[in-house]
Image (cartoon, grey):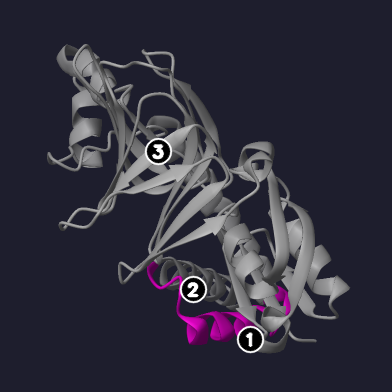
Amino acid sequence: MTIDDAETAALRTAARDWLLRLHEHPDDTELHVGFAEWISASDAHAQAWSRTHDSWQAMEGLAGAVHSNPPLRPTSRLPSRRSLLTLAMSGATIGLATTLLMRPEAYRTGAGERQRLSLGDGTRVDLDSQSSLNVAVDAGRRSVLLIEGRAFFDVAHDMHRPFVVTAGDIAVRVLGTAFAVEHKADGLSVDVARGKVLVDRGNGMQPVELSIGERLIIDAAGSARRAAVDPSRIAAWRDGKIYAVDRPIGDLIGELRGYHKGIILLNAPKLASRRVTGVYHLDRPLQTIADIVIAHHGGVTIWTDYFVYITDS
């Protein structure tokens, strides 16, 4: 092995190490800063990262083709990928493996993906990026478990089968209406676009009735408050849009992160605190972020589509 070959191999090893560490610790700001310094140190570092990232994306694409819609059943243990692949490799159990991979009642979207579902009762569901839910609709029940993310429900009327969406500690009950539910780590929200819904918060608390144009926001501590919302702008993500009204840039970029497969590091406290009003596009998150940052005199550096570094200048 020549000296050049050895150096190339060392750089590729370093790039793989950065990739693994960034995946394992996506919220480690110091790690992100260290990576930014490493990749900007030389063109050779950037090239090694680009090759490593391209290889990783190719592998992710192959894995996604096999596991694009994995079952999500919180009440039962899921088969591991190793188990599923073992089943798939056995001619006698190919049909079982296919069934496990394609169960229609469990849905998940990746970064930048949205999915529209039509349920057996006529209800339509829109699932936002990086969201997952389980659906059970049969002769005796209509229930949805929103595990994470955002969904919009246009519910078919059925007096004998109330439609119930559970998210975290709340249950939203309706007969026929249209509403959105968001379930994130920092809390929950329910927006009503048509009709009325009843939000049961459990723990002996009084249920909350919401009408068209009302929003209920519940923070991580369980505190709840009502707010008004324009019904025409509820779940605007369905149309690939964010409507921002006097919203901090840091908060806006945080939402755009959910539509990008890579890492977006915001190391810009001044920029993050500035407020904006406007309509922003979700389908081109990197371009939208770059436009926002440049318009407010910040700095943005993009190393492949995977890593974006934002500064105050």
Question: What residue is disc 2 on?
Answer: 18
User: Which mark is first along the chain, 3 or 1?
Assistant: 1
Q: Secondary structure at mark 2?
A: helix
Residue extent of the magenta highlight:
24-44
Relative placement, left or right, of 181 versus 161 is: right
Amino acid carrying mark 1 in the image: Glu
Which of disc 2 and disc 1 is earlier in sequence?
A: 2
Label 2 to label 3, Cα distance in Å?
47 Å
**Relative to 175, is 220 above or below?**
below
- Residue 166 lies, with reference to residue 309, above or below; the image says above
Residue 184 coordinates in the image, percent (x, y): 41, 58
Specify whether residue 40 is painted magenta: yes
In whole angstroms, how far apart are the C-alphas of marks 1 and 2? 12 Å
Q: Is residue 69 above or below residue 283?
A: above
The nearer-to-camera label among 1 and 3 is: 3
Tell me: 275 left or right of 222: right
Decide which of 302, 199 is in the foreground and name it: 199
In which quadrant is the C terminus drawn?
Answer: bottom right
Q: Which residue is mark 3?
A: 197
Give the quarter of the image for residue 261. Answer: bottom right
Using a 10 Å C-alpha cutoff, classify the residue at mark 1 as few (fewer than 14 neighbours), some (14 to 19) or many (20 or more): few
Mark nearest the camera among 2 and 3 is 3
The local crowd at label 2, few if under 14, some if 14 to 19, many if 20 or more residues have their Cα within 10 Å, is many
Contact (Cβ within 8 Å) of mark 1 with mark 3: no
Callout 1: SS: helix
Residue at point 71%, 88% (across, down): 270
- Determine which quarter of the picture holds residue 65: top left
Instruction: Compare residues 208 and 284 and report the one nearer the observer.
Output: 208
Q: Does the CB distance between marks 1 and 2 fall below 8 Å?
A: no
Residue topped by disc 1: 37
198 to 136, vertically: above or below: below
Q: Residue at horizontal 34%, vertical 41%?
A: 198
